[in-house]
Amino acid sequence: MSWWWAGAVGAARKKLGDDERSNTFQSVALVIGVTGIVGNSLAEILPLSDTPGGPWKVYGVARRPRPAWNADHPIEYIQCDILDESDVVSKLSPLTDVTHIFYATWANRSNENENCEVNGAMLRNVLTAVIPNAANLSHICLQTGHKHYVGPFEAIVSGKIQPHDPPFEEDLPRLDYPNFYYTLEDIVFEESAKRDGLTWSVHRPGVIFGFSPFSMMNIVGTLCVYAAICKYENKPLKFPGSKASWNSLNVASDADLIAEQQIWAAVDPYGKNEAFNISDGDKKFDEDDLPKTYESVALIVGVTGIVGNSLAEILPLSDTPGGPWKVYGVARRPQPSWSADHPVQYIQCDVSDETETLSKLSPLTDVTHIFWVTWANRPTESECCHANGAMLRHVLSAVVPNAPSLRHVCLQTGHKHYIGPFETFGKLKPHDPPFTEDMPRLNAPNFYHTLEDILLETAAGRGEQTLTWSVHRPALVFGFSPHSMMNLIGTLCVYAAICKYENTPLKFPGTPAAWNCYSVVSDADLIAEHQIWAAVDPNAKNEAFNCSNGDVFKWKHFWRILAEQFGVEYVEFDEREERVSMVERMKGKERVWEEIVKAEGLAPTKLEEVAVWWFVDVILGRECMLDSMNKSKEHGFLGFRNTGTSLVSWIDKMKGYKIIP
């Protein structure tokens, strides 16, 4: 589930003034067909300040002079006939800074053999001019379409071939008929294979809804002209198609959505070297499109946290198990801008305040599932037990008596169940890894134990109305939230950005044991999926489960990846150097972070809001903490994540939301 900005970019139709545009760029796009129906959307979305992979510099290529309706797009417009090889070499080979090509154009000829020849020549001309001269070119997005599955127009009209049966899937074989889409794919595959590190993606939309007076396939524009003529001539608007077309189910592809998918594939490791269908799919809902009835109603306590944010993205999706889901999200702070597009009912509530909790949560009589993904830090573990226990009691006391359909409570704890709280590190002997769920509790105060006891007591006291529960024990969590007290990746990204800004090498701040040992991680989306599984699957009721990605990693391998993501100097860990804590290293860096935020045009944040130095010191001071996922697998959960891919994707997401440079 990595469609992490779907709908968000297209909703942000902010225009940039000249003084707001970035002077430095992370990525440089070459949009071929910039006045076309999807090219126009790319030209609008790529320059936005919150577009993933940005800030983007954008070159836009089209055959015609620049039209007036395109003039306000902040792009460098290049009039070029890409069928003319010399014109292409002259105008595109100087673009040595291009990092991504978006190919969204085509030429129509009288038969498909000519289409193959002409469109193939156009693409070859562009790639031949750009690839040898753009040293940093990393990805090519190629747009084709549903004719991949049904054949070209001439074959459809003549009935010469049998199209594939819908629904179309990307692995369907090619039809035995000339098709310029196949020609274009072959050229992209061939040229990419010649260049190490050059990736590609193919995008196959259905009928496209979008804006462009210069598109040969703008059905919405054409129908609007037809309607206007009918209106002018005072005639009824008659449907001009067949009975089958009138009655059949169809899919369409919004031009902005196609642009968003192409940008996703261009910057997300999940999108590399793959072909994708793209249609609207109703994965996210506009307010008017939300389901009128719900199968389940979730209350996420801690919705702006690292896992709460993933739950808020995944639960409302149309194909989430147990759905359609109505979602309430509770957090202490006002709703942040980066979560504003989540289709949840946001409730600002301090759950440590019993009166406020009762006032705001007891009216939620339709809640069926509670997802507890929050915690409060206090100076001692005894205080943590008291504070966190009170918070959970307040919520359960407000909701359980008033929500007659409440069925399940998911409680998130973690690996401190097996190693003890922070204050006991080095004093209390932890369990030997790999950790399994049946290990006994350690003999020390632990607020995780307090929360479990409250949950079990509440469930047992429900009487005839059965209330089930599940406990989820993730490892170190990789995810997205500027509001998480335990966001290690976000903190390390801030550290890397500061090193880059100050031109200092990225030194590993941990111990030799942490550098060399095997570790496990839990992807925030995977944890959310794990909790949703437990909430709706009978096999998971009244059980505790570990939740980690299913592979292992070493920090010594990931440290180079982190350095590469920020273009900062990588150095090997020197075990002879005396360890300097992150708290000490980053002391007094508040002003530096302010300068970085201003220089890079980031979302306004203070250093203490996005970096938790003490937590890095704790985590990178530990040895091996492996767990076992066998119990989850035996009960039916087979989810996993590639931890290396997870690391990069969350960094990309934080960059996309302008939390980090």
Image (cartoon, rainbow, N blue to C red):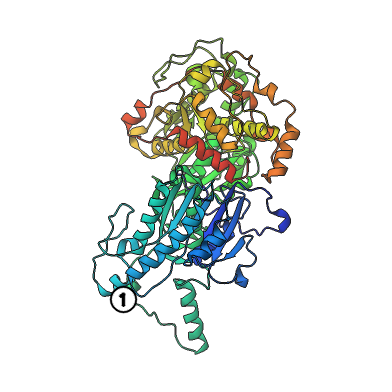
Residue reaching furthest to the front:
86
- 599 vs 374, left or right, is right
Residue 44 drawn above or below residue 485: below
Q: Secondary structure at mark 1?
A: helix
Residue 603 drawn above or below residue 354: below
Q: Residue at x 53, y 13 (%)?
A: 444
Residue 375 place in picture, x, y as percent: 58, 30
| Amino acid at pointer 1 | Lys
Q: Name the one closer to the observer, 178 or 418.
A: 178
Residue 267 place in picture, x, y as percent: 51, 46
Residue 399 in view in this figure: no
Q: Residue at x 58, y 25 (%)?
A: 571
Q: Name the one closer to the observer, 557 or 12.
A: 557
Residue 381 place in picture, x, y as percent: 60, 19
Q: Residues within 10 Å of mark 1 (few under 14, many from 20)?
A: few
Instruction: Quickly name the residue at label 1.
Output: 243
The image quadrant that residue 168 belongs to is: bottom left
Residue 225 drawn above or below residue 166: below
